[in-house]
Amino acid sequence: LCSSKSYYRSLSLFLFLRSVVFSRFCSPCDIKELFCTATGLSRNTTISLLDSTGELFQNVLTQVAEQFSRAFKINELKTEVTNRLAMLEKRVELEGMKVVEIEKCRSDIKKLREEMASRNNSFLDDNKKLTPRRDVPSYPKYMLSQQTIDALRKPTFDVWLWESNEMLSCLEHMYHDLGLVKDFNINPITLKRWLLCIHDNYRNNPFHNFRHCFCVTQMMYSMICLCNLQEKFTQVDILILMTAAVCHDLDHPGYNNTYQINARTELAVRYNDISPLENHHCAVAFQIFSQSDCNIFANFDPEAFKQIRQGTITLILATDMARHGEILDSFKQKVDNFDFTNEEHVTCLKMVLIKCCDISNEVRPMEVAEPWVDCLLEEYFMQSDREKVEGLPVAPFMDREKVTKPTAQIGFIKFVLIPMFETVMKLFPQIEEVMVQPLRESRDRYEELKQIDDAMNEVSTGLRHPSVPESTTKS
Ligand SMILES: *[C@@H]1O[C@H](CO)[C@@H](O)[C@H](O)[C@H]1NC(C)=O
Ligand SMILES: *[C@@H]1O[C@H](CO)[C@@H](O)[C@H](O)[C@H]1NC(C)=O
Ligand SMILES: *[C@@H]1O[C@H](CO)[C@@H](O)[C@H](O)[C@H]1NC(C)=O
Ligand SMILES: [Zn+2]
């Protein structure tokens, strides 16, 4: 209660009020009592409010209090409606789960039929006659065999065998298998819709496409399994790692940041040349979450959503290779005294993990890894060709006239991949055999291929210049 000045005139007390502040829980009686206490008068004092011209405000206190009480009723109503809505949503979700159950039953029935068919052909023949074809459900693309489920946990998984539907089922399986659906009460139908929407928002680039998204996420899943990350991290961290991997290249246009900046594209302008692509991937990810039918975080309280959002943004922005040195250096400083209870350490590790997965193709078996080099070169050539046409600077390693598969890979494996994975190895020694060793083998293989390439070039140079002695071409 702030009064600028008060004085007595006979039995009247005049308060010149600048402002009166009282709790929203005050009743008219309380307010009156506050006035009386503040001025030291007895409680039965009559209080009237006059405006500056001396006119009486009729029942002002009562009116104010009534307005408040009306506002409270509106709030009560709001709470009730929200509660009822939440209950209805819960019911819809339960129905959704039933749909999943029905799908499971159907696939069980189908399995049973197949088993019977394999055991007794004559029975099936009879059965076929009895059952019209339209009643036989078939969901071949959505069924993962136990063999696939087991293989999915390893970096040796062959990522080329699967169609989009099958990769979607695999991603869905990972969220269930890691306990994320259960622990965070994610609606399983929303999870399906979300993944489908993710798929639709990757473009058909030679490299930065949905299969790359799948590879990065599958490698993340493998690392979570291999390094027992669920023992070290909270489930929130696991959810952030997986979700950031799924979203990390959304709507990638196939031309890198340098091109965006040099060509002054809309993206570069929008994000002021600061990681334009990564900012875009992340913005698209959260545009998708803003559609309620794709929002797997719908059941989260605002604080939890904030944490997941912040974590996901940090990880997606960390995939800008322009920040590679900075991020790896920061991790190197922490790794020797790594503290899993230190939030800064954990965030830094998560950034390094998503970086590892993003560029992990060479960790995979040679047959799986090699086609990705062709895809990457195809995307590079697409960019360099366009840069030539538009008169922009061209990097030699992207120029179809200058680069070969071995030259493209050797430096990258030696100076980027191996140092980063060897640093992570200090924390998780188990990755040496499964991830670092394949990298070393790949480096050695590309070095051999390069020697062969070089020798071939010398031969062809020798053929063009017959005066060069034969012996020098064989070194
Ligand atoms: C107010 O109450 C006091 C006792 O608390 C009494 O002495 C006084 O006469 C009352 N005044 C009026 C105006 O009722
Ligand atoms: C298949 O099942 C039928 C009846 O269920 C039985 O008569 C028949 O011998 C079985 N055939 C084989 C090959 O097991
Ligand atoms: C992006 O392309 C430019 C050529 O325009 C090249 O110099 C740069 O190294 C590329 N960046 C990455 C991360 O590949
Ligand atoms: Zn990527």
Image (spheres, rainbow, N blue to C red):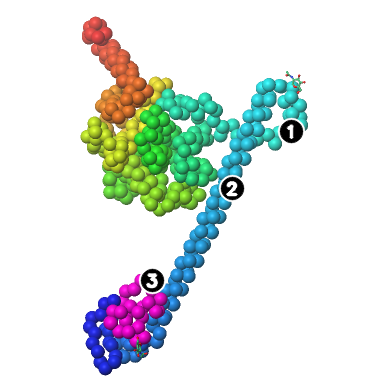
Quick one: 183 or 302, which is closer to the camera? 183
Residue 173 placement, left or right of 357: right
Q: Distance between the residues labelled 3 and 1?
A: 70 Å
Residue that appears at 74% across and 29% down? 127
Residue that appears at 60% across and 44% down? 98
Q: Quadrant of residue 274?
A: top left
| Rendered image: mark on residue 24 | 3
- Kindly report which numbered mark, 1 or 2, lies closer to the viewer in this rendering: 2
- Kindly report which numbered mark, 3 or 2, lies closer to the viewer in this rendering: 3
Secondary structure beneath disc 2?
helix
- The disc labelled 2 sits on which kind of residue? Glu
Residue 327 on image: x %, y %? 26, 37
Ligand 1 sits in which quadrant? bottom left
Residue tagged by mark 1?
Answer: 131
Secondary structure beneath disc 3?
loop
- The disc labelled 3 sits on which kind of residue? Arg
Residue that appears at 36% across and 43% down? 312
- Which of the two labelled residues, at mark 1 and mark 2, occupies the earlier sequence position? 2
Q: How far apart are marks 1 and 2 (CA)?
A: 29 Å
In magenta stretch: residue 119: no
Give the answer, above or below, for where 354 lies relative to 42: above
Residue 55 on image: x %, y %? 34, 90
Residue 300 placement, left or right of 130: left
The reply to whether discs 3 and 1 touch (Cβ–Cβ < 8 Å) is: no
Residue tagged by mark 2?
Answer: 95
Quick one: 360 or 108, which is closer to the camera? 108
Secondary structure beneath disc 1?
loop
Answer few, some or many: residues within 10 Å of disc 3's Cα (few below 14, many 20 plus, some between 14 and 19).
few
> Which contiguous range is marked in magenta?
19-45
